[in-house]
């Protein structure tokens, strides 16, 4: 249990940050962001994921990297952060698909350039999603391997 104390403290701190963000946004309407002529609505869950995912990845990536990915707790924390990043990336793909459908519905010269630009963004975002998925898979394999080595050395 002492080996995981630091990772548990870090995770508890991150959960505290999530709780503070949730309390700060309680009772408020979702945040709306205007980009050109489109409004994006960000709900509490998405806001928490947008705040928590980069913080979790950076903290646990530094911690796992310092120990060459040989700490099970740091690897699990990094996997959680990468899963959050993958979910945020998937949500962004869905937003871009909605923009693409809106642009296809309006036929004018400007929307055709927007359609090709949005298609490129979607392809790049899917590549990013694939990268997160590959990182999650490789890190999970490393963590399972560490766990089996730990179990066989007892």
Image: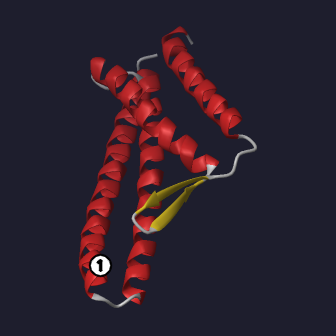
154 relative to 103, above or below:
above
- Residue 49 versus residue 99: which sits nearer the camera? 99
- Residue 7 versus residue 25: which sits nearer the camera? 25
Q: Position of residue 130 (x, y in %)?
A: 32, 57
Q: Tell me what residue is drawn at x 35 percent, y 56 percent.
A: 129
Q: Secondary structure at mark 1?
A: helix
Q: Position of residue 107 (x, y in %)?
A: 35, 91
Q: Quadrant of residue 19?
A: top right
Q: Position of residue 102 (x, y in %)?
A: 44, 80
- Quadrant of the rendering where the N terminus is positioned: top right
Residue 70 visible = no
Q: Quadrant of residue 60?
A: top left
Q: Tell me what residue is drawn at x 38 percent, y 77 percent.
A: 100
Q: Tell me what residue is drawn at x 41 percent, y 55 percent.
A: 89
Q: Position of residue 39 (x, y in %)?
A: 51, 63
Q: How is the image coloured?
A: secondary structure
Q: How many marks?
A: 1
108 relative to 132, above or below:
below
Badge 1: how crowded within 10 Å, few (<14), some, or many (20+)? some
| Residue designated by label 1 | 115
Q: Tell me what residue is drawn at x 38 percent, y 44 percent.
A: 136
Residue 119 lies left or right of residue 14; in this view the side is left
Q: Quadrant of residue 143?
A: top left
């Amino acid at each position: 249990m002492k080996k995981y104390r630091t990772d548990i403290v870090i995770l508890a701190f991150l959960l505290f940050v999530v709780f503070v963000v949730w309390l700060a946004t309680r009772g408020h309407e979702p945040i709306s962001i205007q980009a050109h002529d489109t409004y994006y609505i960000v709900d509490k869950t998405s806001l928490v994921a947008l705040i928590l995912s980069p913080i979790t990845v950076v903290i646990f990536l530094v911690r796992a990297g310092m120990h060459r990915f040989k700490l099970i707790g740091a690897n699990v924390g990094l996997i959680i952060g990468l899963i959050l990043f993958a979910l945020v990336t998937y949500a962004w793909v869905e937003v871009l698909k909605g923009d693409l459908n809106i642009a296809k519905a309006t036929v004018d010269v400007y929307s055709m350039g927007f359609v090709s630009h949005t298609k490129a963004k979607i392809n790049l975002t899917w590549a990013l999603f694939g990268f997160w998925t590959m990182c999650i898979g490789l890190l999970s394999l490393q963590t399972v391997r560490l766990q089996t080595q730990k179990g066989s050395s007892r």
